[in-house]
Image (cartoon, helix red, strand yellow):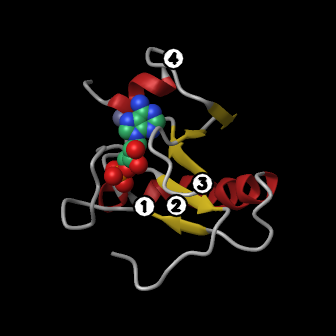
Amino acid sequence: MDCLFCKIVAGEIPAQVVYQDDSTYAFRDIHPQAPTHVLVLPRKHIASLAHAEAGDQALLGHMLQVSARLAIQEGLGEGFRLIVNTGSDGGQTVDHLHIHVLGGRAMHWPPG
Ligand code: AMP
Ligand code: ZN
């Protein structure tokens, strides 16, 4: 499958990996939008949040917990933001589900 993030998970494309376990993988975003910008994704290919199925519930919950744990590990105790861009209007550019973990500066609202 021609998926950038599947290739990173397979070790075919290098990334700054910060966490991995049986079902998830996390690495630093190549174009960080904040002092900390990590992407948390499932090892298995799910095209987007809209493509997740009923059987993915535990995996999705695990990804949220991994994201929060990583944020704390990264020193983001003052707060952080999780983003899941979904589909073209949602600003998704890589079609492999991922959670952006952003922090290290004050976030703005509403987002652009
Ligand atoms: P999204 O636009 O929500 O689909 O997010 C895709 C993210 O992947 C963007 O923030 C990109 O900067 C990031 N990205 C693209 N290529 C790479 C790469 N090779 N390594 C790490 N992050 C990447
Ligand atoms: Zn993929």
Comparing labels 1 and 3, the label whose residue is closer to the camera: 3
Residue farthest toward the left in the current orientation of the protein: 88
User: What label sits on residue 57 in the rendered view?
Assistant: 2
- Residues at badges 4 and 3 in contact (C-beta under 8 Å)? no
What is the quadrant of residue 112 in the picture? bottom left
Amino acid type, mark 1: Ala
Which amino acid, by three-letter code, is at mark 4?
Gly
Tag 3, which secondary structure?
A: helix
Ligand 1 located in image quadrant: top left
- The structure residue drawn at horizontal position 60% and vertical position 54%, both measured from the top left corner, is 63
> What's the distance in space between the residues labelled 1 and 2, CA to CA?
6 Å
What residue did someone put label 3 on? 63
Label 2: state its secondary structure. Answer: helix
Q: Is residue 37 above or below residue 105?
A: above
Label drawn at residue 22: none
Q: Alpha carbon of mark 4 to alpha carbon of mark 1: how far?
A: 28 Å
Q: Is residue 39 left or right of residue 73?
A: left
4 or 3: tag closer to the N-terminus: 4
Question: Circle 1 — which element?
Answer: helix
How far apart, in angstroms, are the residues tagged by discs 2 and 4? 26 Å
What's the CA distance linking mark 1 and mark 3? 15 Å
**Which of label 4 and label 1 is nearer to you?**
4
**Mark 4 and mark 3: Cα distance apart in space:** 20 Å
